[in-house]
Amino acid sequence: MSQERVIESHGLTKQFGDNLAVNGLDLSITQGTIYGFLGPNGCGKSTAIRMLTGLLEPTSGAVTLFGQPIKHHEESLKQRIGYMTQKFSLYDNLTVLENLRFVASIYGLGRQQRKARIQELIQLYELGALTKQLAGAMSGGQKQRLALACATLHQPELLFLDEPTSAVDPENRRDFWEHLFDLSDQGTTILVSTHYMDEAERCHALAILENGHKRADGTPQQLMNDMPATVFETQGPQLRQLKQQLVSHPEILSAAQVGTRLRVLVNKTCAQPATLLHTLGAEYCFDEVRPSLEDVFVANTGGRHVG
């Protein structure tokens, strides 16, 4: 993977009245990376993406794409960027083929290039049987494939995807990510926002966002290694009652039931977490377990983050 920095931002901030949507976001994303924004609705993911694409002017801070500031380079950068919005934004009253032709004309593709590229994408995204179907009559998975085809029609070097799989089933989500890895392998840099933990874990690197703040940043494995909590599990009777006992203690960051087991996060500032758990739940046996990305998210949000 190349070390060329495709996206860089420093202190990127956006304020809408009294609402600080994005606060001092610093990013450095290299070529070919699939980088994720992980966070709930309203955490600033879409606002950050809109600033990074040049669609929204920041209140303060700076962004460079391919080493160039967005301002005064909008037209040249437009040809190098693809953007797939969270809501299906193509024309419902146009067919699949008409939508592809329309997008090709926006990017100024010549007739022969346009024809060849559209045929390539129709085959790649399995749209051959749908070319005459109105986009508005397509399923969620079909719309997703068409939207990705349109976003990559001009072969952008940088692709922004704003919660692209929020309306599709798990099988279509998995297939969609296979396409993203193919694009990454070809050198395309991808920034994707999501609230799905399994998707975030597929990213090469990611940032956890909450209320406009970046709470953590790194590869999924780094984030799990560095998380500010130790994870334990236990099982037995009356787990709901045990949970209430545990979460009342300030060193317990979280306790959540997963099937027949209770998963507990203990602050790493606690010198003897196993002893603490035995004191709080003497009749239970607690086993230390490997952290998950969901544990990382829980440990860094909801007021539990450090700093």
Image (cartoon, grey):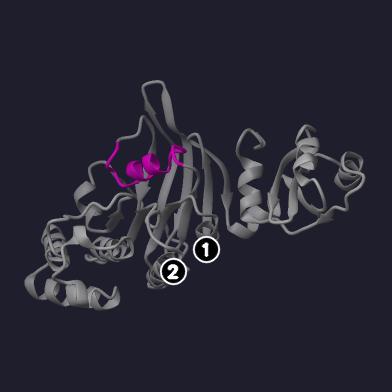
Residue 219 or 244: which is nearer the viewer? Answer: 244
Identified at 23% across, 53% down, the residue is 78
* Relative to 64, 197 lies left or right: right
Position of residue 8 measured from the top left corner of the image (x, y, whole percent): 42, 48
Residue 158 appears in the picture as rendered: yes
Q: Is residue 277 magenta?
A: no
Q: Residue at x 52, y 57 (%)?
A: 200
Quadrant in which the C terminus appears = top right
Q: Which residues are magenta?
A: 41-56
Q: Earlier in the sequence, mark 1 or mark 2?
A: 2
Label annotation for residue 118:
none
Q: Which numbered disc, 1 or 2, marks the residue closer to the eye?
A: 2
Identify which residue, 18 or 167, lies in the foreground: 167
Q: Is residue 54 magenta?
A: yes
The amino acid at mark 2 is Glu
**What whole-number distance in Å separates the C-alpha atoms at marks 1 and 2?**
15 Å
Residue at 38% in and 73% down? 186
Please state which amino acid type lies under the numbered disc 1: Arg
Is residue 117 visible from the viewing direction of this image? no
Q: Quadrant of residue 95?
A: bottom left
Category of crowding for the residue at label 1, using alpha-carbon neighbours closer than 10 angstroms: few (below 14), some (14–19), many (at least 20): some
Residue 54, position as x, y percentages in the image:
28, 43
Proximity of marks 1 and 2: CB atoms separated by less than 8 Å:
no
Which numbered circle lies on residue 171? 2
Q: Which residue is mark 1?
A: 202
Secondary element under disc 2, as helix, strand or loop, is helix
Up/down of 236 relative to 124, above or below: above
Quadrant of residue 180 in the image?
bottom left
The residue at the point 22 percent across, 58 percent down is: 79
Pick the front one: 78 or 73: 78
